[in-house]
Image (cartoon, grey):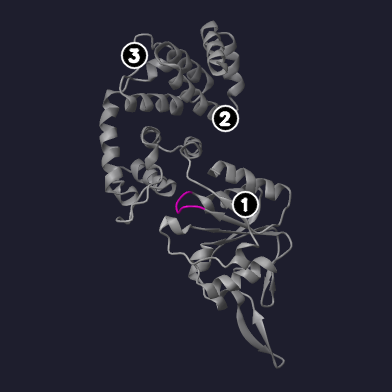
Amino acid sequence: MNPEDLKTYLDRLITNNLKISTMIWGAPGIGKSSIVSQLATLHQLEFIDIRLSQLAPTDLRGLPVAEDGVSKWFPPEFLPAHGRGILFLDEINMAPPAMQGMAQQLILDRRVGSYTVPEDWFVWAAGNRREDRAGVFEMPAPLANRFLHLQVEASFESFKAYALSEGVHEQIISFLSFRPTLLHKIDPQQPAWCSPRSWMMANSLHHSGLDLAPAIGAAAYAEFQSFLVMYHTLPDLEPIFAGNGDNIPFPLEPSARYATTIGLTVHATDADRAYCAFQWLIQVATTEWVQLFISDLLGLLRSRGQLGMLAALIDKDPSIQQFLQDYRQLVRG
């Protein structure tokens, strides 16, 4: 599944109050823990993220303390004692077998030592796969059998929707639209490589005018810099948004077409500007570019509550209505 599918699945587990221990598998940097954190915020749940690979068994079970001649285990303060939330055991298969065995008690019995997980807490975990070159241990079959297993892969469309909603720099979104294979590309020879996580770091660096290579690696940054040179050739978008784009041609180079289309999406900040951009595109571009623009734009306008205003403008425009009719026939055919 892609990250959006994962988010939907986990959301339904919460909505239906299914306290089934769940394991999320996926390559590093694709947003597994971020999605869980977002869901916790969305449902107003507490969120405790425990990196098991950084703990010893006694850290999870607690320390033995003598009381009335009996040794009792005092649980660590980071485990939840009340409330409602998600207990997230990250990097579970990077933990050594002894630590995984301790985690098994927490997952299977919802308790370890004298500690019991509160009733209103979900217990989820995440880990990387062996093929991702992560330093992982084999998960014991008894532990694996206690989980639901969700496999998640990097998806550019999911990342793009997230990036547009979060205001990621249009040049990064445009570049990855042109080179989607660089969204997630592990380079075992370099410490910095491309992933959704590292591109979000690169976004912060780019907004600050800093070198992106420390986040995404030198090779990807070299390609990105070459892509930026093309930005000087792009058409001025403001006349298009003002409805004065009749004499502005659509670029010929694919990279420039991606950049122009993403630029129109990012800067269509209201229904009127979106409508003018839509009008211009159906005059100068082929269907695939109009489709790219609309598919990205609709989610943004919906989140802003402006989709109805755009629909009202389109309903009054015969040229757009004709385009939509032709497009429906093309899809059906």
Q: Is residue 217 left or right of residue 62?
A: left
Question: Residue 67, percent across and down?
Answer: 69, 89
Residue topped by disc 1: 40
Locate residue 58: give its quadrant: bottom right
Comparing marks 1 and 2, which lies closer to the viewer?
1
Q: Main secondary structure of the magenta part?
A: loop
Tell me the magenta residue range: 26-30
Q: CA distance from mark 1 to mark 3?
A: 47 Å
Q: CA distance from mark 2 to mark 3?
A: 30 Å
Mark closer to the chain start, 1 or 2: 1
Residue topped by disc 2: 304
Residue topped by disc 3: 249
Question: Residue 257, percent across and down?
Answer: 36, 24
Q: Amino acid at mark 3?
A: Pro
Q: Is residue 259 left or right of residue 86?
A: left
Classify mark 1: helix, strand or loop: helix
Could you tell me if residue 209 is visible in this image?
A: yes
Question: Residue 180, percent across and down?
Answer: 40, 37
Between 304 and 148, the one lying in front of the other is: 148
Residue lying at 29% horizontally and 43% vertically, measured from the top left = 221
Classify mark 3: helix, strand or loop: loop
Residue lying at 41% horizontally and 24% vertically, measured from the top left = 261
Comparing marks 1 and 3, which lies closer to the viewer?
3
Residue lying at 53% horizontally and 48% vertically, measured from the top left = 152
Mark closer to the chain start, 2 or 3: 3
Q: Is residue 145 above or below residue 242?
A: below
Q: Amino acid at mark 2?
A: Arg
Residue found at the very far bottom of the displayed protein: 69
Classify mark 2: helix, strand or loop: helix
49 in the magenta segment: no
Q: Amino acid at mark 1?
A: Ala
